[in-house]
Amino acid sequence: MRGYAPRAREEIVRPRRSSGASGRPLNFTVRPRVARIEHIALWTEDIDRLARFYAEYFGATVGPKYANPSKGFESRFLTFQSGTRLELMKTSVLRPLKYEPGVHRMGLTHLALSLGSENRVNELTATLREAGFAVEEGPRRTGDGYYESVILDPDGNRLELTV
């Protein structure tokens, strides 16, 4: 359309050739912009242990604990310098599935944390290894050019440390 300008919260998206779940071609013309991921939530059996890990090694600011005893729920938000937050949650009612530490699974498989330089990736990887945390891979340069290492947090969640 001549003279059409997308609204501030929208961007033009070119039609795609791939198919959606229905098998029909995807044909988005306008979609809302996502500015950033606000937070990601992790179930844990020990909120304080995981909060200490992310605070000590990644500089997260640990927020106050929230508890709702009637629902058997506790949580605590951690805030990183970028503004992104991680919510650590504990339940006494639900039974979240447990996986072996570091297992590859469908869905969320790792969190990638940017450290700003290859030196920081090397230094933090070495520090975490010396502190007894599992280093699954690297540091290394991947085929698509990323410099990274993969470590496991105290609950076995995969963390990709990148530049």
Image (cartoon, grey):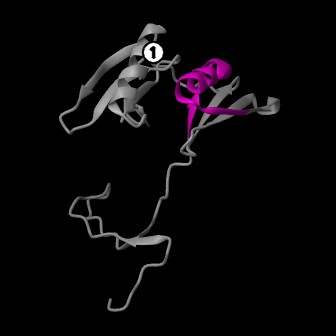
- Please say whether residue 103 is visible from this viewpoint: no
Q: Position of residue 102 (x, y in %)?
A: 40, 19
Q: Is residue 86 left or right of residue 113?
A: right
Q: Position of residue 35 (x, y in %)?
A: 49, 58
Amino acid carrying label 1: it is Leu
Which contiguous range is marked in magenta?
Answer: 40-63
Extreme residue in the left direction = 143
Question: Is residue 36 part of the magenta span, yes or no?
Answer: no
Q: Is residue 3 left or right of residue 37?
A: left
* 83 vs 20, nearest the viewer: 83
Please name the residue that numbered disc 1 is placed on.
Answer: 128
Task: Please give the count of numbered marks on the rendered protein.
Answer: 1
Q: Is residue 81 left or right of residue 144?
A: right
Determine the secondary structure under disc 1: helix
* The image quarter in which residue 133 lies: top left
* The image quarter in which residue 152 lies: top left
Which residue is rendered at x = 53% and y = 28% of the image?
A: 58
Question: Is residue 54 part of the magenta span, yes or no?
Answer: yes
Which residue is rendered at x = 32% and y = 29% of the image?
A: 148
Which residue is rendered at x = 65% and y = 34% of the image?
A: 61
Q: Vertical placement of 98 versus 60: above or below? A: above
Extreme residue in the front direction = 119
Identify the image quadrant of the C terminus.
Answer: top left
Q: Vertical placement of 108 versus 10: above or below? A: above
Q: Position of residue 130 (x, y in %)?
A: 44, 8
Q: Position of residue 145 (x, y in %)?
A: 22, 38
Question: Which class describes the residues within 10 Å of circle 1: few (<14), some (14-19), or many (20+)?
Answer: some
